[in-house]
Amino acid sequence: MATIFISEFISAPALAMLRKHHQVTYEPESYQQRGTLIASLQHVEGLIVRNLTQVNAELLAAAPHLKVVGRLGVGLENIDLPTCSTSNITVIPATGANAESVAEYVLGAAIALSRGFLPATQQTLAGAWPRPRFSACHELAGKKLGIVGFGSIGRVVFHKANAFGLQCVAYDPMLTGAAVEIGQQAIPLLPLNDLLANSDVISLHLPLLPATKNLFSHLTLDQMKQGAFLINTARGGIVDEAALAERLRSGRLGGAALDVFEGEPAKNLKHFTGLENLILSPHIAGVTVESNERVSLLIATEVDQFLRSTS
């Protein structure tokens, strides 16, 4: 029986499964009390976190028996991977478990932006009847979706976008060749500048790395097609928020949906004030009842099997 500490939310069935085989401490708000959290890890062999627990060198030094870190999600920016590697600590992300939820968010945001649902609601509630304006919106069918980052989530976005009649192209710095074959279909791989210039909607699915930090700066945003939409469900640091706000305000870009921000929780978004062609949400694209269950059970199963195999 191994000792596991869980510092953020996990589903009840996943927690119950772990408790059948291990001694589990479940304190889903403990990431907020850093000192108390670190003091609790002296005998822990397994740690399960989401994105708010900073698994850095300080924390790892306080957990000398730690063997495995389970990440309830896919981004690993909050985990010190080099220190984990040198300390022989395995890191397990929930790759693919929230892809359906993220892909639904992307397509829903694309539809809402292209049809102007949010400003139409606000104006109709205010007593206007802006039928001429919103009758001039466009369908998504036949438009081009540029998927930037073509991993597990990007591929689910591709499948769902096909059902809406979108033409998809992709850019991924880790992939080579002219196209990626997926079943009976192929998606063209383009250089980033070609994708930017030709896509009506761009959806971001890249990790936050030194190479992707502020990748969508004013220079990159200005390469996008006039009136295009940008959807970011990846990481906030990839997009220069102030530069994006300027281009939304000027009409250079048609709209944007941001589920992630440079600082989270996002406390200062004044640069977006007054924009009606903008959807903002608090990092929930990949978080639904269903995806929470999949992510929780996947990580619980993987951590359980790892600890039992190494005991």
Image (cartoon, rainbow, N blue to C red):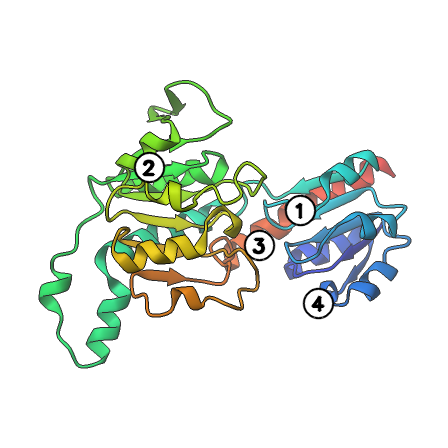
Image mark for residue 293: 3
Comparing labels 4 and 1, the label whose residue is closer to the camera: 4
Which tag, 4 or 3, sits closer to the chain's start? 4
Which tag, 1 or 2, sits closer to the chain's start? 2
Q: Is residue 39 visible?
A: yes
Mark 4, secondary structure of its residue: loop
Image mark for residue 196: 2
Left or right, residue 295 beside residue 48: left
Image mark for residue 299: 1
Label 4 sits on residue? 29
Comparing labels 1 and 2, the label whose residue is closer to the camera: 2
Q: Amino acid at mark 3?
A: Glu
Q: Amino acid at mark 4?
A: Glu
Mark 2, secondary structure of its residue: helix
Comparing labels 4 and 3, the label whose residue is closer to the camera: 4
Comparing labels 3 and 2, the label whose residue is closer to the camera: 2
Classify 254 as above or below 35. Answer: above
Q: Residue furthest bottom?
A: 127
Quarter of the image with the C terminus in it:
top right
Q: Nearer the viewer, residue 279 or 226?
A: 226
Residues at marks 3 and 2, CA–CA distance in whole angstroms: 35 Å
At which x and y percent is residue 58?
A: 82, 52
Residues at marks 2 and 4, CA–CA distance in whole angstroms: 41 Å
Q: Nearer the viewer, residue 220 or 166?
A: 220
Which tag, 1 or 3, sits closer to the chain's start? 3
Mark 3, secondary structure of its residue: helix
Q: Nearer the viewer, residue 240 or 143?
A: 240
Mark 1, secondary structure of its residue: helix
Residues at marks 1 and 2, CA–CA distance in whole angstroms: 36 Å
Residues at marks 4 and 1, CA–CA distance in whole angstroms: 19 Å
Bin the neighbour count of mark 4 within 10 Å (Cα to Cα): few under 14, some 14-19, many 20 and up: some
At which x and y percent is residue 234?
A: 49, 47
